[in-house]
Image: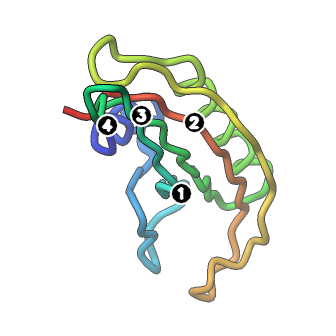
């Protein structure tokens, strides 16, 4: 699921770096950092169905708040309601929030966080 989501989002956001769990100090903005917040599974009478529901947070960083907000809107457009017809069964917007501009590395960037629920089949 992780690589499929990353590749889809990166293709939709031309010239924007998209990575999981890491935002290297000094990396160019704009950029999107994805975090898997939680994953739940589905158990049926025969055992694990392989169906999963993940909550994924996408932190959108840019030089200004407006640019970060616009990047978040583009991420929402790319992912909300999307499915790949195979592994990704559906992506659904859950929440959008503004976060402090300090990244913890001394950078000051615009930052908007978007949460999605992702239903997928784990093979």
Residue drawn where x is 61% and y is 58% of the image: 61
| SS state under label 2 | strand
Q: Mark 4 vs mark 3: which is more N-terminal? A: 4
The label shown at residue 37 is 1
**Inter-mark Cα distance, 2 to 4:** 17 Å
Q: Position of residue 64 (x, y in %)?
A: 74, 59
Q: Quadrant of the C terminus?
A: top left
Q: Residue at x 78, y 56 (%)?
A: 65
Bin the neighbour count of mark 3 within 10 Å (Cα to Cα): few under 14, some 14-19, many 20 and up.
few
Q: Earlier in the sequence, mark 1 or mark 2?
A: 1
Residue drawn at the location 76% of the way across and 44% of the way down: 96
Q: Is residue 90 shown left or right of residue 74?
A: left
Which of pointers 3 and 1 indicates the residue nearer the eye?
Answer: 3
Q: Pointers 1 and 2 in contact (CB under 8 A)?
A: no
Q: How far across and down, in percent of the image, does residue 21 sit?
A: 42, 65
Q: Which residue is mark 2?
A: 117
Q: Which residue is mark 3?
A: 42
From the image, state whether disc 2 or disc 4 is nearer to you: 2
Please give left or right for residue 32 compared with residue 2 in the image: right
Helix, strand or loop at label 1? It is strand
């Amino acid at each position: 699921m992780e690589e499929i989501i990353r590749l889809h989002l990166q293709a939709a956001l031309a010239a924007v770096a998209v990575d999981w769990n890491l935002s290297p100090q000094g990396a160019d903005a704009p950029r999107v950092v994805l975090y898997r917040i939680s994953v739940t599974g589905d158990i049926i009478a025969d055992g694990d169905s392989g169906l999963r529901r993940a909550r994924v947070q996408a932190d959108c960083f840019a030089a200004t708040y407006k640019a970060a907000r616009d990047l978040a809107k583009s991420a929402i457009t790319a992912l909300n309601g999307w499915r790949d017809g195979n592994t990704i069964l559906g992506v659904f917007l859950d929440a959008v929030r503004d976060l402090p501009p300090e990244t913890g590395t001394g950078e000051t960037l615009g930052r908007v966080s978007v949460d999605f629920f992702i239903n997928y089949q784990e093979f």
